[in-house]
Amino acid sequence: MELFSDMPSDEGLPGAERRRAMIAVMTATTMAVFDGTIVNVALPQISLALNASAGASIWVANSYLLAVAMTLATFASLSGRVGFRGLFTAGLGVFTLASLGCALSSSIGMLIGMRVLQGIGGAAMLSIAPAIHRTVFPNRLLGRILGLNAVLVAASTAIGPVLGGTLLATLGWEWIFAINVPLGIVAVVLSLSAIPDARKPGREPFDIAGALLSAIAMGALIMAADTCSRLSEKGEAHDAALTAAAYGVTALVAGIAFVWDQRRARQPLLPLAMFASGRFSLAALTSLASFVGQGIAFVALPFLFQNAYGYSAFQSALLFTPWPIGIVLVAPHAGRLADRHSPALLSTIGLALFTVGLALLALLPDHAPAWDIAWRTLICGMGFGFFQSPNNREMLSNVAREHNGNASGVLAIVRTFGQCLGAALLGVVISVYTADAMALGETQMNAAQDAQAIRIALWAAVAATALATGVSFSRIRKARASPV
């Protein structure tokens, strides 16, 4: 297999070490993706087993996301100090031990605490995983390995709910966390033997102020998004709006202070010089806008399938499956093409197809059969799969190798923030329609109102991905003028 063949001029590691490093990173990625998809399915059972309220059990999911968001930039910067091997292995170890702690939790408070530790370990892994790929593999194979990684994420997303349902039905909720332990042990052993150190020389003072400000800014953004998603709850809209505004102002102030600090710091947490490359900046902006569209669709479609069309939760999961299948079918080919042709052009084509797929979903009839939903979601998956690998390659290959870890952190940050912003926009749309229903004296929205609200949200997703397509198209000429 060419991914593991050696050529005299190759950068990166020898073929056998590449294989071990790839297995370690992809095992860790699978664990993180499974946790994100399985935990949401298990929340009702966890709430019942630990005698917790629905509001408290939601924090089993939110605490993980919050911990990841608040520490991504810090870990991306730390990778240059402690090395890829040390940071990735430590993060993987923390994630694995925290998974065991989650499985052994006897109260909701303990479980939430363990999920915070899981999030910290997950951030250490996810913030530098793409950078490890670039360090381990030569540039001529970067698109291919990123395409393979996209396939893994998509397959894990598709399998996650099924695996979660099986574990919940046969062994109990504890096993959705316990399954990480043997996988984590294998990945730690492989990481210690195969992942390179990639440590930067020098010992400049660590940017503590930047780390704190980035954590505050990202944490406040996530909390603002979470609060916006609850604007539709009866009797809480006013308080939720004020709380969301407070979090938003906090995030804005912390973000401005963070940029100011980065201009002054001797060793900035996130070197702003990276963004001097127009191709890197445009790729990051394109990724952000695309993940806003994806975030809206991922949260909106289950509401559409269940509340408006009357499908069960299991049927909704099956209706969503064509999306990751589309990614699996397309992403490997997109990755290979990106190694030989313009990633900017390929990304633009993929985004255009993704936008068409979202528009087709927004145009679904009132009583859509399963086959009509399936082919539209398949187009979305194929478009996103054709976009993601080339765009990630464009981001990583347009920064200096000493900034690999930072660029990888930016990639993870725009993905996390984009998805959260998408969920927040959906919350705002639903809150508007709920307010209209209450003004008419109704206690809740009917199926037709649900469908209309989701369609409006899907059109917002179309607008986000159309914006991403426009930004992506603008960089094609720049890519032709300065090929990588």
Image (cartoon, rainbow, N blue to C red):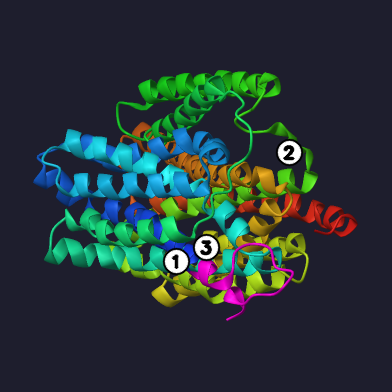
The spot of residue 293 in percent (x, y) is: 56, 51
| Residue type for callout 1 | Ile
- Name the residue nearer the viewer: 89 or 209: 89
Whole-angstrom CA distance, mark 1 to mark 2, is: 31 Å
* Residue matched to label 2: 275
Left/right placement of residue 204 relative to residue 428 reads right
At horizontal 69% and vertical 19% (from top left) the residue drawn is: 264
* Residue matched to label 1: 23
**Tag 3: Cα neighbours inside 10 Å, few (<14), some, or many (≥20)?**
many
**Tag 1: Cα neighbours inside 10 Å, few (<14), some, or many (≥20)?**
some
| Residue type for callout 2 | Phe
Highlighted range, magenta? 1-19
At horizontal 44% and vertical 25% (from top left) the residue drawn is: 244
**Tag 2: Cα neighbours inside 10 Å, few (<14), some, or many (≥20)?**
some
The spot of residue 177 in percent (x, y) is: 24, 53
Quarter occupied by the C terminus: bottom right
Whole-angstrom CA distance, mark 3 to mark 2, is: 35 Å
* Residue matched to label 3: 361
